[in-house]
Amino acid sequence: MTPETHESLLGYIKRRSDAEGFPEAGGFLTMLGQSYGRAMIEEAERLAEDLDIDLATLEPILPSAQSKDPALDWSFHRMHRDPVCPSCIAASQPRRKEWRHAMVSACAEHGCQLIDECPGCGGPLTLLGDGYAGCLCGASYGDAMAVPASSLETEFSRMIAGRSAKLAGVELCADDGLHNARTVWFLSANMAKARTGKEGKSIYPKTVAEARTRLRSVEALLLDWPTAFDDHVVQRWNGPGAEGMTAAMRLGAWYRSLLRQKGALAEALLSRCLIVVSTVCGDAYKTNRHKDGSNWVSAAQAGDILGIRSERVVEAVRGGMMIGSQGRSGTGHLHTIVRMQDIEEVHELRARSGTKEKVRSILGVSRKQFQLMEEARFFGAGCRMSAHPCVDGDYDLENICAAVDEIRQVAHGESARADGLVAFRKVNLRRTTDRTGILKIYRLIADQKLRAVTFPEGDGLGNALFDAAEIDRVLQDHGGARAWTAGEVAGFSGWKPECVTGWCEQGLLQATRGKRGSFNVWQITEEALSRFRQEFQVVSDLAKEGKTTSRKLLASLADRGISSVGSQPVGTSSRGHLIRTGEIARMIAFPTT
Protein backbone atom coordinates (compact mmCIF):
# COMPACT_ATOMS: atom_id res chain seq x y z
CA MET A 1 0.00 0.00 0.00
CA THR A 2 1.53 3.31 -1.09
CA PRO A 3 0.49 6.95 -0.44
CA GLU A 4 -2.09 8.50 -2.75
CA THR A 5 -1.55 11.77 -4.58
CA HIS A 6 -2.01 14.75 -2.20
CA GLU A 7 -2.52 12.39 0.76
CA SER A 8 -1.25 13.51 4.17
CA LEU A 9 1.31 11.46 6.07
CA LEU A 10 -1.07 11.02 9.01
CA GLY A 11 -3.89 10.02 6.62
CA TYR A 12 -1.65 7.38 5.06
CA ILE A 13 -0.72 6.04 8.50
CA LYS A 14 -4.41 5.78 9.45
CA ARG A 15 -5.24 4.05 6.18
CA ARG A 16 -2.47 1.54 6.83
CA SER A 17 -3.68 1.16 10.43
CA ASP A 18 -7.18 0.24 9.20
CA ALA A 19 -5.74 -2.24 6.71
CA GLU A 20 -3.66 -3.87 9.46
CA GLY A 21 -6.76 -4.29 11.63
CA PHE A 22 -6.02 -1.67 14.27
CA PRO A 23 -9.09 0.23 15.57
CA GLU A 24 -7.06 3.42 16.04
CA ALA A 25 -3.76 4.68 14.59
CA GLY A 26 -2.03 5.04 17.95
CA GLY A 27 -1.83 1.29 18.40
CA PHE A 28 -0.42 0.83 14.90
CA LEU A 29 2.39 3.34 15.53
CA THR A 30 3.13 1.77 18.91
CA MET A 31 3.50 -1.58 17.19
CA LEU A 32 6.02 0.03 14.82
CA GLY A 33 7.88 1.62 17.73
CA GLN A 34 7.10 5.09 16.38
CA SER A 35 5.66 8.26 17.92
CA TYR A 36 4.05 10.89 15.71
CA GLY A 37 6.03 14.12 15.83
CA ARG A 38 9.22 15.91 14.83
CA ALA A 39 11.52 13.00 15.76
CA MET A 40 9.63 10.64 13.45
CA ILE A 41 9.85 13.11 10.57
CA GLU A 42 13.58 13.65 11.04
CA GLU A 43 14.22 9.88 10.95
CA ALA A 44 12.45 9.39 7.63
CA GLU A 45 14.67 6.44 6.63
CA ARG A 46 13.62 4.47 9.69
CA LEU A 47 9.94 5.37 9.18
CA ALA A 48 10.06 4.21 5.55
CA GLU A 49 11.68 0.96 6.64
CA ASP A 50 9.05 0.38 9.34
CA LEU A 51 6.25 1.07 6.83
CA ASP A 52 7.99 -1.18 4.28
CA ILE A 53 7.97 1.41 1.49
CA ASP A 54 10.71 3.23 -0.41
CA LEU A 55 11.96 6.50 1.05
CA ALA A 56 11.47 8.16 -2.35
CA THR A 57 7.78 7.20 -2.18
CA LEU A 58 7.40 8.58 1.34
CA GLU A 59 9.31 11.86 0.93
CA PRO A 60 6.65 13.75 -1.13
CA ILE A 61 4.20 13.64 1.82
CA LEU A 62 6.68 14.34 4.66
CA PRO A 63 6.29 17.67 6.49
CA SER A 64 9.52 19.65 6.72
CA ALA A 65 10.87 22.89 8.14
CA GLN A 66 12.45 23.61 4.73
CA SER A 67 9.57 22.43 2.55
CA LYS A 68 8.57 24.61 -0.39
CA ASP A 69 5.07 23.09 -0.31
CA PRO A 70 2.88 25.23 2.00
CA ALA A 71 0.82 22.15 2.91
CA LEU A 72 3.96 20.50 4.32
CA ASP A 73 5.34 23.54 6.20
CA TRP A 74 6.18 22.12 9.62
CA SER A 75 5.85 25.50 11.36
CA PHE A 76 2.08 25.42 10.58
CA HIS A 77 1.64 21.67 11.09
CA ARG A 78 -1.41 20.76 13.21
CA MET A 79 -0.50 18.88 16.38
CA HIS A 80 -3.83 18.91 18.26
CA ARG A 81 -6.54 17.80 15.81
CA ASP A 82 -6.80 15.86 12.55
CA PRO A 83 -9.83 17.36 10.75
CA VAL A 84 -11.50 15.75 7.71
CA CYS A 85 -13.88 16.68 4.91
CA PRO A 86 -17.16 14.69 5.17
CA SER A 87 -17.58 14.70 1.40
CA CYS A 88 -14.09 13.32 0.79
CA ILE A 89 -14.58 10.54 3.38
CA ALA A 90 -17.99 9.66 1.92
CA ALA A 91 -16.38 9.38 -1.54
CA SER A 92 -13.56 7.18 -0.12
CA GLN A 93 -10.98 9.78 -1.04
CA PRO A 94 -7.70 10.10 0.92
CA ARG A 95 -7.18 12.56 3.74
CA ARG A 96 -5.52 15.50 1.98
CA LYS A 97 -2.21 16.99 3.07
CA GLU A 98 -3.50 20.60 3.18
CA TRP A 99 -5.91 19.64 5.99
CA ARG A 100 -2.84 19.36 8.24
CA HIS A 101 -2.14 23.12 7.86
CA ALA A 102 -3.16 24.97 11.04
CA MET A 103 -4.96 27.76 9.11
CA VAL A 104 -6.95 25.52 6.74
CA SER A 105 -10.60 25.10 7.68
CA ALA A 106 -12.18 24.09 4.34
CA CYS A 107 -11.80 21.43 1.67
CA ALA A 108 -10.25 22.73 -1.54
CA GLU A 109 -11.96 19.94 -3.50
CA HIS A 110 -15.59 20.30 -2.28
CA GLY A 111 -15.63 23.83 -0.79
CA CYS A 112 -17.18 22.63 2.49
CA GLN A 113 -16.04 23.13 6.06
CA LEU A 114 -13.72 20.57 7.67
CA ILE A 115 -14.90 18.87 10.86
CA ASP A 116 -12.64 18.07 13.83
CA GLU A 117 -15.34 16.64 16.11
CA CYS A 118 -17.08 13.29 15.76
CA PRO A 119 -20.65 13.65 14.39
CA GLY A 120 -21.69 10.75 16.66
CA CYS A 121 -20.14 11.20 20.12
CA GLY A 122 -18.96 14.79 19.69
CA GLY A 123 -15.41 13.94 20.77
CA PRO A 124 -12.40 15.69 19.20
CA LEU A 125 -10.69 14.07 16.23
CA THR A 126 -7.25 13.74 17.78
CA LEU A 127 -4.10 12.79 15.93
CA LEU A 128 -4.08 9.08 16.72
CA GLY A 129 -7.32 8.29 18.59
CA ASP A 130 -9.54 7.20 15.68
CA GLY A 131 -9.60 5.20 12.47
CA TYR A 132 -9.28 6.29 8.88
CA ALA A 133 -12.96 7.00 8.13
CA GLY A 134 -14.70 6.75 11.46
CA CYS A 135 -14.62 7.20 15.22
CA LEU A 136 -14.17 4.47 17.83
CA CYS A 137 -17.80 5.09 18.80
CA GLY A 138 -18.82 3.61 15.44
CA ALA A 139 -19.86 6.85 13.72
CA SER A 140 -18.67 7.45 10.15
CA TYR A 141 -17.26 10.88 9.30
CA GLY A 142 -18.84 10.62 5.87
CA ASP A 143 -22.31 10.83 7.50
CA ALA A 144 -21.64 14.35 8.85
CA MET A 145 -23.40 17.27 7.19
CA ALA A 146 -21.26 19.09 4.61
CA VAL A 147 -21.54 22.82 5.47
CA PRO A 148 -20.43 25.26 2.74
CA ALA A 149 -17.27 27.19 3.68
CA SER A 150 -16.84 30.95 3.31
CA SER A 151 -15.13 32.41 0.23
CA LEU A 152 -11.88 33.19 2.08
CA GLU A 153 -11.76 29.74 3.68
CA THR A 154 -12.10 28.13 0.26
CA GLU A 155 -9.59 30.44 -1.45
CA PHE A 156 -7.05 29.96 1.33
CA SER A 157 -7.44 26.18 1.20
CA ARG A 158 -7.00 26.20 -2.58
CA MET A 159 -3.85 28.28 -2.19
CA ILE A 160 -2.36 25.82 0.35
CA ALA A 161 -3.34 22.91 -1.92
CA GLY A 162 -1.33 24.45 -4.78
CA ARG A 163 -4.36 25.48 -6.83
CA SER A 164 -5.26 28.83 -8.35
CA ALA A 165 -6.64 31.34 -5.86
CA LYS A 166 -7.45 35.04 -5.81
CA LEU A 167 -6.78 37.28 -2.80
CA ALA A 168 -6.41 41.06 -2.60
CA GLY A 169 -7.33 41.31 -6.28
CA VAL A 170 -4.31 39.19 -7.27
CA GLU A 171 -4.32 35.85 -9.04
CA LEU A 172 -1.93 33.85 -6.89
CA CYS A 173 0.30 31.20 -8.40
CA ALA A 174 1.23 27.95 -6.69
CA ASP A 175 4.93 28.86 -6.48
CA ASP A 176 4.23 31.63 -3.95
CA GLY A 177 1.93 29.55 -1.73
CA LEU A 178 4.41 29.31 1.15
CA HIS A 179 5.01 33.08 1.28
CA ASN A 180 1.35 33.96 0.72
CA ALA A 181 0.24 31.71 3.58
CA ARG A 182 2.66 33.44 5.93
CA THR A 183 1.40 36.84 4.77
CA VAL A 184 -2.20 35.84 5.62
CA TRP A 185 -0.99 34.68 9.04
CA PHE A 186 0.82 38.02 9.52
CA LEU A 187 -2.42 39.90 8.84
CA SER A 188 -4.55 37.74 11.13
CA ALA A 189 -1.99 37.68 13.95
CA ASN A 190 -1.97 41.49 13.99
CA MET A 191 -5.75 41.73 14.20
CA ALA A 192 -5.74 40.64 17.86
CA LYS A 193 -3.57 41.57 20.82
CA ALA A 194 -1.83 39.03 23.02
CA ARG A 195 -2.01 39.06 26.81
CA THR A 196 0.96 41.42 26.86
CA GLY A 197 -1.02 43.90 24.77
CA LYS A 198 1.28 43.49 21.76
CA GLU A 199 0.14 42.63 18.27
CA GLY A 200 1.54 39.79 16.16
CA LYS A 201 2.18 37.50 19.15
CA SER A 202 -0.73 35.10 18.55
CA ILE A 203 -0.24 31.34 18.69
CA TYR A 204 -1.33 29.10 15.84
CA PRO A 205 -4.95 27.82 15.90
CA LYS A 206 -5.43 24.45 17.60
CA THR A 207 -8.91 23.73 16.24
CA VAL A 208 -10.81 24.30 13.01
CA ALA A 209 -13.06 26.78 14.81
CA GLU A 210 -10.04 28.85 15.85
CA ALA A 211 -8.66 28.78 12.30
CA ARG A 212 -12.05 29.90 10.98
CA THR A 213 -12.07 32.81 13.47
CA ARG A 214 -8.58 33.89 12.37
CA LEU A 215 -9.55 33.89 8.71
CA ARG A 216 -12.80 35.70 9.40
CA SER A 217 -10.85 38.58 10.96
CA VAL A 218 -9.05 39.32 7.67
CA GLU A 219 -11.75 38.25 5.21
CA ALA A 220 -12.81 41.81 4.38
CA LEU A 221 -9.18 42.97 3.96
CA LEU A 222 -8.47 40.32 1.36
CA LEU A 223 -11.82 40.05 -0.45
CA ASP A 224 -13.40 43.54 -0.19
CA TRP A 225 -10.40 44.89 -2.05
CA PRO A 226 -9.10 47.53 -1.78
CA THR A 227 -11.76 49.40 0.22
CA ALA A 228 -11.49 47.44 3.47
CA PHE A 229 -7.69 47.37 3.36
CA ASP A 230 -7.53 51.12 2.72
CA ASP A 231 -9.75 51.74 5.75
CA HIS A 232 -7.56 49.46 7.83
CA VAL A 233 -4.39 51.38 6.92
CA VAL A 234 -6.07 54.73 7.67
CA GLN A 235 -7.31 53.37 11.00
CA ARG A 236 -3.80 52.31 11.97
CA TRP A 237 -2.40 55.66 10.81
CA ASN A 238 -4.81 57.57 13.03
CA GLY A 239 -4.70 55.08 15.90
CA PRO A 240 -3.98 56.15 19.48
CA GLY A 241 -0.27 56.53 20.14
CA ALA A 242 0.63 56.95 16.46
CA GLU A 243 3.29 59.64 16.19
CA GLY A 244 5.59 61.04 13.50
CA MET A 245 5.15 61.84 9.85
CA THR A 246 6.23 58.65 8.08
CA ALA A 247 4.76 55.21 7.51
CA ALA A 248 7.59 53.58 9.46
CA MET A 249 6.90 55.81 12.48
CA ARG A 250 3.10 55.90 12.50
CA LEU A 251 2.39 52.32 11.38
CA GLY A 252 5.25 51.00 13.48
CA ALA A 253 5.97 47.27 13.78
CA TRP A 254 3.04 46.37 11.51
CA TYR A 255 4.58 48.28 8.61
CA ARG A 256 8.08 46.93 9.25
CA SER A 257 6.70 43.39 9.34
CA LEU A 258 4.86 44.01 6.07
CA LEU A 259 8.15 45.05 4.48
CA ARG A 260 9.66 41.69 5.45
CA GLN A 261 6.88 39.63 3.83
CA LYS A 262 7.52 38.01 0.44
CA GLY A 263 5.39 36.83 -2.46
CA ALA A 264 2.77 38.31 -4.75
CA LEU A 265 0.22 38.88 -1.98
CA ALA A 266 2.72 40.80 0.17
CA GLU A 267 3.73 42.94 -2.82
CA ALA A 268 0.10 43.83 -3.48
CA LEU A 269 -0.49 44.77 0.16
CA LEU A 270 2.66 46.89 0.38
CA SER A 271 1.98 48.66 -2.90
CA ARG A 272 -1.57 49.53 -1.79
CA CYS A 273 -0.36 50.60 1.65
CA LEU A 274 2.09 53.10 0.10
CA ILE A 275 -0.66 54.49 -2.15
CA VAL A 276 -2.97 55.03 0.81
CA VAL A 277 -0.22 56.59 2.89
CA SER A 278 0.80 58.99 0.11
CA THR A 279 -2.65 60.03 -1.09
CA VAL A 280 -4.78 59.83 2.03
CA CYS A 281 -2.53 60.02 5.06
CA GLY A 282 0.22 62.29 3.78
CA ASP A 283 3.45 60.33 4.32
CA ALA A 284 6.42 62.70 4.31
CA TYR A 285 8.27 60.29 2.01
CA LYS A 286 5.59 60.77 -0.64
CA THR A 287 4.42 64.37 -0.19
CA ASN A 288 8.03 65.63 -0.29
CA ARG A 289 8.92 63.77 -3.46
CA HIS A 290 10.55 65.56 -6.37
CA LYS A 291 8.40 66.48 -9.33
CA ASP A 292 10.51 64.63 -11.88
CA GLY A 293 8.31 61.59 -12.38
CA SER A 294 10.69 59.35 -10.44
CA ASN A 295 9.55 56.79 -7.90
CA TRP A 296 10.96 57.61 -4.47
CA VAL A 297 11.23 55.32 -1.46
CA SER A 298 12.39 55.72 2.12
CA ALA A 299 15.88 54.78 3.27
CA ALA A 300 14.36 51.99 5.37
CA GLN A 301 12.60 50.47 2.38
CA ALA A 302 15.71 50.91 0.23
CA GLY A 303 17.72 49.07 2.87
CA ASP A 304 15.24 46.19 2.83
CA ILE A 305 15.43 45.99 -0.97
CA LEU A 306 19.24 45.92 -0.93
CA GLY A 307 19.50 43.73 2.16
CA ILE A 308 21.59 46.27 4.12
CA ARG A 309 21.10 48.62 7.06
CA SER A 310 19.18 51.79 6.23
CA GLU A 311 22.00 53.81 7.83
CA ARG A 312 24.20 52.95 4.86
CA VAL A 313 21.65 54.44 2.47
CA VAL A 314 21.44 57.59 4.61
CA GLU A 315 25.25 57.84 4.57
CA ALA A 316 25.31 57.47 0.77
CA VAL A 317 22.87 60.38 0.39
CA ARG A 318 24.77 62.48 2.93
CA GLY A 319 28.06 61.82 1.11
CA GLY A 320 26.67 62.64 -2.32
CA MET A 321 27.03 59.06 -3.59
CA MET A 322 23.28 58.74 -4.16
CA ILE A 323 20.66 61.30 -5.15
CA GLY A 324 18.18 61.85 -2.34
CA SER A 325 16.40 64.30 -0.12
CA GLN A 326 16.70 64.68 3.64
CA GLY A 327 14.53 66.61 6.05
CA ARG A 328 13.50 66.56 9.69
CA SER A 329 10.05 66.12 11.19
CA GLY A 330 8.72 68.06 14.13
CA THR A 331 10.03 65.34 16.46
CA GLY A 332 13.54 65.73 15.07
CA HIS A 333 13.54 62.47 13.11
CA LEU A 334 15.69 62.65 9.96
CA HIS A 335 13.69 61.55 6.90
CA THR A 336 15.65 60.33 3.88
CA ILE A 337 14.16 59.44 0.51
CA VAL A 338 16.00 58.12 -2.54
CA ARG A 339 15.10 57.43 -6.13
CA MET A 340 14.09 53.87 -6.93
CA GLN A 341 16.15 53.94 -10.12
CA ASP A 342 19.28 54.64 -8.03
CA ILE A 343 18.43 51.73 -5.74
CA GLU A 344 18.15 49.48 -8.79
CA GLU A 345 21.56 50.66 -10.00
CA VAL A 346 23.11 49.97 -6.59
CA HIS A 347 21.44 46.56 -6.59
CA GLU A 348 23.22 45.77 -9.89
CA LEU A 349 26.52 47.05 -8.46
CA ARG A 350 26.14 44.80 -5.42
CA ALA A 351 25.48 41.82 -7.70
CA ARG A 352 28.76 42.31 -9.59
CA SER A 353 30.98 43.54 -6.74
CA GLY A 354 32.89 41.46 -4.25
CA THR A 355 35.30 41.59 -1.35
CA LYS A 356 38.83 40.18 -1.34
CA GLU A 357 37.49 37.05 0.35
CA LYS A 358 34.93 36.48 -2.39
CA VAL A 359 37.47 37.06 -5.18
CA ARG A 360 39.93 34.63 -3.54
CA SER A 361 37.16 32.05 -3.26
CA ILE A 362 36.31 32.41 -6.97
CA LEU A 363 39.96 32.22 -8.02
CA GLY A 364 40.86 29.43 -5.61
CA VAL A 365 44.03 31.09 -4.27
CA SER A 366 45.32 31.80 -0.77
CA ARG A 367 45.42 35.16 0.97
CA LYS A 368 49.23 35.44 0.61
CA GLN A 369 49.12 34.56 -3.09
CA PHE A 370 46.35 37.07 -3.72
CA GLN A 371 48.49 39.77 -2.09
CA LEU A 372 51.31 38.93 -4.51
CA MET A 373 48.87 39.02 -7.44
CA GLU A 374 47.78 42.50 -6.40
CA GLU A 375 51.41 43.58 -6.07
CA ALA A 376 52.03 42.28 -9.61
CA ARG A 377 48.94 44.19 -10.85
CA PHE A 378 47.56 40.89 -12.13
CA PHE A 379 44.16 42.47 -12.77
CA GLY A 380 43.96 45.84 -14.49
CA ALA A 381 42.35 49.00 -13.20
CA GLY A 382 39.07 47.96 -14.84
CA CYS A 383 38.71 45.20 -12.28
CA ARG A 384 38.25 47.68 -9.46
CA MET A 385 35.26 49.93 -8.94
CA SER A 386 34.75 53.07 -6.88
CA ALA A 387 33.97 52.49 -3.22
CA HIS A 388 30.30 52.97 -2.35
CA PRO A 389 28.71 53.01 1.14
CA CYS A 390 25.99 50.60 -0.02
CA VAL A 391 28.29 48.14 -1.79
CA ASP A 392 30.39 45.43 -0.12
CA GLY A 393 33.85 45.32 -1.67
CA ASP A 394 35.26 47.21 -4.65
CA TYR A 395 36.31 44.31 -6.90
CA ASP A 396 34.43 44.02 -10.20
CA LEU A 397 33.67 40.30 -10.33
CA GLU A 398 32.40 40.50 -13.90
CA ASN A 399 35.67 41.95 -15.23
CA ILE A 400 37.78 39.62 -13.08
CA CYS A 401 35.95 36.57 -14.44
CA ALA A 402 36.38 37.97 -17.98
CA ALA A 403 40.15 38.33 -17.41
CA VAL A 404 40.37 34.74 -16.14
CA ASP A 405 38.39 33.52 -19.17
CA GLU A 406 40.94 35.21 -21.46
CA ILE A 407 43.72 33.27 -19.71
CA ARG A 408 41.64 30.11 -20.14
CA GLN A 409 41.10 30.71 -23.86
CA VAL A 410 44.84 30.98 -24.67
CA ALA A 411 45.70 27.76 -22.79
CA HIS A 412 47.40 25.09 -24.89
CA GLY A 413 44.50 22.74 -24.28
CA GLU A 414 46.73 19.69 -23.93
CA SER A 415 45.64 16.73 -21.85
CA ALA A 416 46.97 16.91 -18.31
CA ARG A 417 50.06 14.82 -17.60
CA ALA A 418 50.72 13.14 -14.28
CA ASP A 419 54.11 14.86 -13.86
CA GLY A 420 55.84 17.99 -15.02
CA LEU A 421 52.85 20.22 -14.28
CA VAL A 422 52.28 22.67 -11.46
CA ALA A 423 48.99 24.31 -10.43
CA PHE A 424 48.85 28.10 -10.35
CA ARG A 425 48.04 28.08 -6.64
CA LYS A 426 51.43 26.42 -5.99
CA VAL A 427 53.41 29.03 -7.92
CA ASN A 428 54.17 31.10 -4.82
CA LEU A 429 56.91 31.84 -2.30
CA ARG A 430 56.80 28.25 -1.13
CA ARG A 431 58.32 27.30 -4.49
CA THR A 432 61.02 29.94 -4.55
CA THR A 433 62.26 32.74 -2.32
CA ASP A 434 62.65 35.08 -5.28
CA ARG A 435 59.77 37.52 -4.90
CA THR A 436 60.73 39.40 -8.06
CA GLY A 437 60.64 36.21 -10.10
CA ILE A 438 57.16 35.28 -8.80
CA LEU A 439 55.83 38.74 -9.63
CA LYS A 440 57.32 38.46 -13.14
CA ILE A 441 55.60 35.09 -13.68
CA TYR A 442 52.27 36.58 -12.59
CA ARG A 443 52.66 39.45 -15.03
CA LEU A 444 53.51 37.07 -17.88
CA ILE A 445 50.41 34.99 -17.11
CA ALA A 446 48.21 38.08 -16.86
CA ASP A 447 49.58 39.34 -20.21
CA GLN A 448 48.94 35.86 -21.70
CA LYS A 449 52.62 35.46 -22.59
CA LEU A 450 53.01 32.49 -20.26
CA ARG A 451 50.18 30.15 -21.14
CA ALA A 452 48.64 27.35 -19.15
CA VAL A 453 48.99 23.77 -20.37
CA THR A 454 45.41 22.98 -19.39
CA PHE A 455 42.71 25.17 -17.86
CA PRO A 456 39.30 23.38 -18.06
CA GLU A 457 36.04 25.30 -18.18
CA GLY A 458 34.56 25.73 -14.71
CA ASP A 459 37.88 25.49 -12.85
CA GLY A 460 39.20 28.41 -10.81
CA LEU A 461 42.51 30.04 -11.74
CA GLY A 462 44.19 28.26 -8.83
CA ASN A 463 43.61 24.90 -10.60
CA ALA A 464 45.10 26.00 -13.95
CA LEU A 465 48.11 23.77 -14.74
CA PHE A 466 51.41 25.20 -16.07
CA ASP A 467 54.61 23.58 -17.31
CA ALA A 468 56.86 23.32 -14.22
CA ALA A 469 60.04 23.42 -16.34
CA GLU A 470 58.87 26.61 -18.04
CA ILE A 471 58.10 28.18 -14.65
CA ASP A 472 61.63 27.32 -13.42
CA ARG A 473 63.18 28.65 -16.65
CA VAL A 474 61.41 31.98 -16.23
CA LEU A 475 62.69 32.18 -12.65
CA GLN A 476 66.24 31.59 -13.86
CA ASP A 477 65.98 34.01 -16.81
CA HIS A 478 64.81 36.79 -14.55
CA GLY A 479 67.54 36.50 -11.99
CA GLY A 480 65.75 34.21 -9.67
CA ALA A 481 68.44 31.99 -8.16
CA ARG A 482 66.79 28.73 -7.15
CA ALA A 483 66.72 28.16 -3.41
CA TRP A 484 65.67 25.20 -1.30
CA THR A 485 64.74 24.70 2.30
CA ALA A 486 66.76 22.37 4.53
CA GLY A 487 63.98 19.82 4.20
CA GLU A 488 64.05 19.99 0.40
CA VAL A 489 67.85 19.57 0.32
CA ALA A 490 67.49 16.55 2.59
CA GLY A 491 64.81 15.17 0.32
CA PHE A 492 66.90 15.01 -2.88
CA SER A 493 70.31 14.38 -1.24
CA GLY A 494 69.36 11.60 1.13
CA TRP A 495 70.81 13.43 4.15
CA LYS A 496 68.88 13.70 7.41
CA PRO A 497 66.88 16.95 7.68
CA GLU A 498 68.25 17.59 11.19
CA CYS A 499 71.81 17.18 9.85
CA VAL A 500 71.24 19.78 7.11
CA THR A 501 69.67 22.12 9.65
CA GLY A 502 72.64 21.62 12.01
CA TRP A 503 75.16 22.42 9.27
CA CYS A 504 73.24 25.63 8.50
CA GLU A 505 73.19 26.63 12.17
CA GLN A 506 76.97 26.01 12.47
CA GLY A 507 77.68 28.07 9.35
CA LEU A 508 79.20 25.14 7.46
CA LEU A 509 76.42 25.29 4.87
CA GLN A 510 75.73 28.91 3.98
CA ALA A 511 72.02 29.69 4.35
CA THR A 512 69.73 32.54 5.29
CA ARG A 513 66.66 32.61 7.50
CA GLY A 514 63.42 33.25 5.64
CA LYS A 515 59.77 32.33 5.39
CA ARG A 516 57.92 29.78 3.30
CA GLY A 517 54.30 30.61 3.82
CA SER A 518 53.91 31.01 7.58
CA PHE A 519 56.97 28.84 8.46
CA ASN A 520 60.47 30.04 9.39
CA VAL A 521 62.96 28.05 7.29
CA TRP A 522 66.62 27.94 6.25
CA GLN A 523 66.95 28.96 2.58
CA ILE A 524 69.86 27.44 0.67
CA THR A 525 70.83 28.65 -2.80
CA GLU A 526 72.29 26.50 -5.56
CA GLU A 527 75.60 28.33 -5.26
CA ALA A 528 75.81 27.74 -1.51
CA LEU A 529 75.01 24.04 -1.89
CA SER A 530 77.61 23.65 -4.65
CA ARG A 531 80.26 25.33 -2.49
CA PHE A 532 79.38 23.09 0.44
CA ARG A 533 79.80 19.94 -1.62
CA GLN A 534 83.23 21.15 -2.78
CA GLU A 535 84.45 21.96 0.74
CA PHE A 536 83.04 18.96 2.62
CA GLN A 537 82.42 15.27 2.23
CA VAL A 538 79.63 13.62 4.19
CA VAL A 539 81.04 10.66 6.13
CA SER A 540 77.90 8.57 5.71
CA ASP A 541 78.17 8.98 1.91
CA LEU A 542 81.85 7.98 1.96
CA ALA A 543 81.10 4.95 4.12
CA LYS A 544 78.37 3.84 1.76
CA GLU A 545 80.70 4.14 -1.24
CA GLY A 546 83.44 2.24 0.61
CA LYS A 547 81.00 -0.42 1.76
CA THR A 548 81.87 0.14 5.38
CA THR A 549 80.31 1.89 8.36
CA SER A 550 80.62 5.49 9.43
CA ARG A 551 82.00 4.39 12.79
CA LYS A 552 84.90 2.40 11.22
CA LEU A 553 85.64 5.18 8.73
CA LEU A 554 85.78 7.82 11.49
CA ALA A 555 88.11 5.60 13.54
CA SER A 556 90.42 5.10 10.51
CA LEU A 557 90.52 8.84 9.81
CA ALA A 558 91.22 9.58 13.47
CA ASP A 559 94.26 7.27 13.32
CA ARG A 560 95.54 9.51 10.53
CA GLY A 561 94.93 12.67 12.58
CA ILE A 562 91.82 13.74 10.69
CA SER A 563 88.83 14.75 12.77
CA SER A 564 85.27 15.38 11.61
CA VAL A 565 83.20 18.56 11.93
CA GLY A 566 79.50 19.39 11.89
CA SER A 567 78.22 16.43 13.92
CA GLN A 568 75.24 16.66 16.23
CA PRO A 569 74.70 14.42 19.28
CA VAL A 570 71.82 11.95 19.14
CA GLY A 571 71.40 10.13 22.45
CA THR A 572 74.66 8.32 23.14
CA SER A 573 75.75 8.61 19.51
CA SER A 574 76.09 11.36 16.91
CA ARG A 575 75.35 11.96 13.26
CA GLY A 576 76.04 14.46 10.49
CA HIS A 577 79.84 14.06 10.44
CA LEU A 578 81.73 16.00 7.75
CA ILE A 579 85.31 15.69 6.55
CA ARG A 580 86.94 18.63 4.84
CA THR A 581 87.87 17.80 1.26
CA GLY A 582 91.32 19.40 1.79
CA GLU A 583 92.07 16.95 4.60
CA ILE A 584 91.33 13.99 2.33
CA ALA A 585 93.50 15.49 -0.42
CA ARG A 586 96.47 15.93 1.95
CA MET A 587 96.02 12.37 3.25
CA ILE A 588 96.22 11.05 -0.29
CA ALA A 589 99.17 13.29 -1.25
CA PHE A 590 101.15 12.53 1.94
CA PRO A 591 100.21 9.04 3.10
CA THR A 592 101.49 7.94 6.49
CA THR A 593 104.17 5.29 6.53
Image (cartoon, rainbow, N blue to C red):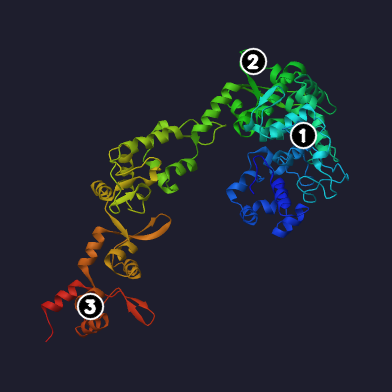
Q: Amino acid at mark 3?
A: Ala
Looking at the image, which is closer to me, 282 or 235? 235
Q: Residue at x 67, y 51 (%)?
A: 41
Q: What residue appears at the point 11 percent right and 77 percent down from the top-left corner?
A: 589
Q: Is residue 257 left or right of residue 498?
A: right
Q: Specify which label sits upstream in the sequence, 1 or 3.
A: 1
Q: Quadrant of the C terminus?
A: bottom left
Q: Position of residue 268 (x, y in %)?
A: 68, 24
Give the structural element (helix, strand or loop) at label 3: helix
Which residue is identified by label 1?
A: 106
The foreground one among 183 and 74 is 74
Residue picked out by circle 3: 543
Q: Answer whether labels 2 and 3 touch (C-beta < 8 Å).
A: no
Q: CA distance from mark 2 to mark 3?
A: 94 Å
Q: Give the label, 1 or 3, closer to the camera.
A: 1
**Badge 2: few (under 14), some or many (20 or more) residues near its Cα, within 10 Å?**
some
